[in-house]
């Protein structure tokens, strides 16, 4: 029961911010133009700053565990490959397949990882969460750029190309260019890189700078969630209910069922297991919606997956914690 209450306290405020965004849109406080601005600000400024803040203060060198980071890397890559195959086989719409793939593998690792370990093992036990983040979050974002670019509508890929230049060869060339450029210039990846670099150099952050960074980073989650709620179209969402529920099941149950037994066989326990549980089975991060919208996708399927997994992970994480405790693994 304590785990359920903790899970609800961690996830329901996130869900309610989406509902508030929807409500604010209906009473004409957040219109489509405002929501588009919020999305752009979160994608280019607030979310990169939040990730920089999360990573810059971590002691990766002091808590390094190569085997654990390697497993996080392996599980993340394998998850993306498995889900990409599922998406290619069962999702016919090109753009929808991209949102399905991204929504099925991207977790709220940075948001929930440290919080869960704090709740179970106390404030002093946070060594594994940063290592889980470094082994998964950069890959989440790199592959999100690739997947969303490859599956973007043709008009979004070509951009400024004229119709007479829209040959298959030109589309492929522009796709390669946009994918490489997207990875190198993606604000979220830049924020991750800068945070990792700051952590490795271990330069003390001035108090004034720290407060400014913290204040900007704090805007990312509420603005992103409310903008998503404001643009949520439940009529479109109903039509995408089947892929949304399928992606949510993969996110909350299937990945944990596949990779957690392997992690246990390797010998991971306690903090390591909790970190892996968050990586594999927590709610889909709101940044998946932000990136989808900013890279030419509709975003309805992404927002549906986020809503379902955010509400559902309170119960699914409690279930997994009960199973892990029953086998004395945590």
Image (cartoon, grey):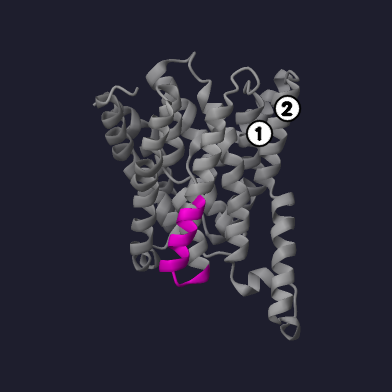
Disc 2 to disc 1: CB gap under 8 Å: yes
Picture residue at 34% right of the left edge, 65% below the top: 238
The tally of labels here is 2
Give the SS element for disc 1: helix
Picture residue at 68% right of the left edge, 39% below the top: 191
Q: Which mark is residue 156?
A: none
Q: Residues within 10 Å of mark 2 (few under 14, many from 20)?
A: some
Report whether 169 appears left or right of 298. Answer: right
Q: Nearer the viewer, residue 210 or 128?
A: 128
**Residue with the mark numbered 1:** 52
Picture residue at 71% right of the left edge, 81% below the top: 166
Q: Nearer the viewer, residue 9 or 274?
A: 274
> In this rendering, does residue 238 appear at all?
yes
**Residue with the mark numbered 2:** 198
Q: Which residues are magenta?
A: 80-94
Give the foreground label among 2 and 1. Answer: 2
Give the SS element for disc 2: helix
């Amino acid at each position: 029961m304590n785990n359920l209450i903790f899970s609800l306290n961690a996830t329901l405020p996130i869900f309610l911010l989406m509902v508030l965004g929807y409500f604010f849109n209906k009473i004409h406080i957040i219109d489509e133009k405002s929501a588009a601005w919020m999305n752009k600000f979160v994608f280019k400024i607030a979310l990169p700053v939040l990730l920089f803040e999360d990573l810059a203060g971590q002691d990766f060198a002091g808590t390094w565990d190569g085997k654990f980071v390697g497993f996080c890397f392996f599980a993340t890559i394998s998850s993306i490959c498995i889900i990409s195959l599922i998406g290619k086989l069962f999702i016919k719409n090109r753009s929808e397949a991209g949102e399905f793939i991204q929504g099925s593998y991207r977790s709220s690792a940075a948001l929930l990882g440290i919080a869960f370990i704090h709740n179970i093992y106390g404030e002093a036990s946070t060594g594994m969460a940063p290592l889980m983040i470094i082994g998964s979050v950069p890959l989440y974002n790199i592959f999100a750029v690739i997947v969303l670019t490859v599956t973007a509508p043709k008009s979004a890929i070509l951009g400024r190309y004229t119709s007479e230049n829209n040959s298959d060869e030109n589309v492929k060339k522009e796709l390669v260019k946009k994918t490489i450029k997207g990875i190198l210039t993606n604000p979220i990846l830049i924020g991750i890189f800068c945070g990792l670099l700051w952590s490795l150099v271990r330069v003390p952050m001035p108090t004034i700078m720290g407060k400014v960074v913290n204040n900007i980073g704090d805007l990312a989650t509420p603005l992103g969630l409310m903008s998503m709620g404001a643009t949520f179209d439940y009529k479109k969402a109903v039509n995408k209910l089947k892929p949304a529920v399928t992606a949510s099941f993969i996110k909350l149950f299937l990945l944990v069922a596949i990779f957690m037994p392997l992690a246990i066989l390797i010998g991971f326990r306690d903090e390591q297991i909790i970190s892996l549980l968050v990586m594999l089975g927590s709610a889909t991060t709101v940044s998946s919606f932000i990136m989808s919208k900013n890279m030419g996708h509709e975003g309805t399927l992404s927002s549906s997956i986020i809503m379902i997994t955010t509400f559902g992970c309170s119960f699914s994480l409690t279930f997994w914690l009960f199973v892990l405790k029953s086998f004395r693994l945590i």
